[in-house]
Amino acid sequence: MLPLQVGFPGGMELIVIFIMAILLFGIPIVLIAGGLALYRQTQTDQPASEEIESLRREVQRLREEIDELDDEE
């Protein structure tokens, strides 16, 4: 049996299709993007603090060298 009226879906059908599209595509994309953002944040925090500490040690070493050179003069 064929439907009598074939055409564009009505208002309620469009709302259901829109909600299903959000559930199937929108929510997983938001979750993946949030997970990637958290992953990048955790990956950049640790090396940055190590790099800062390394630079502080280097500055301290250079200051000590400058002090030694000043003492020699």
Image (cartoon, helix red, strand yellow):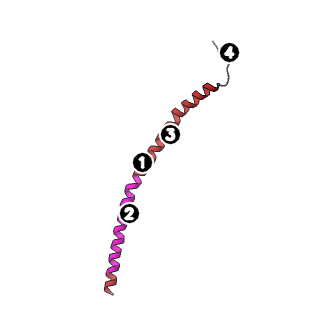
User: In the rendered structure, which amino acid carries the disc numbered 4?
Assistant: Leu
Find the residue positioned furthest to the bottom: 73
What x and y, as percent, mark residue 37? Answer: 46, 47
Q: Earlier in the sequence, mark 4 or mark 2?
A: 4
Quote the CA–CA distance across marks 4 and 2. Answer: 73 Å
Classify 69 as above or below 24.
below
Classify 62 as above or below 41.
below
Chief SS of the magenta region: helix
Residue under pointer 1: 39
Q: Secondary structure at mark 4?
A: loop
Contact (CB < 8 A) between labels 1 and 2? no
Residue under pointer 3: 29
What x and y, as percent, mark residue 63? Answer: 35, 75
- Residue 4's disc is 4
Q: Earlier in the sequence, mark 1 or mark 4?
A: 4
User: Which of these two is toward me, 67 or 1?
Assistant: 67
User: In the rendered structure, which amino acid carries the disc numbered 2?
Assistant: Ile
For the C terminus, the image quarter is bottom left
Quote the CA–CA distance across marks 1 and 4. Answer: 54 Å
Q: Which residues are magenta?
A: 43-67
User: In the rendered structure, which amino acid carries the disc numbered 1?
Assistant: Tyr
Residue under pointer 2: 52
- Crowding at dot 1, Cα within 10 Å, few <14 / some 14-19 / many 20+, comes out as few
Q: Earlier in the sequence, mark 4 or mark 3?
A: 4
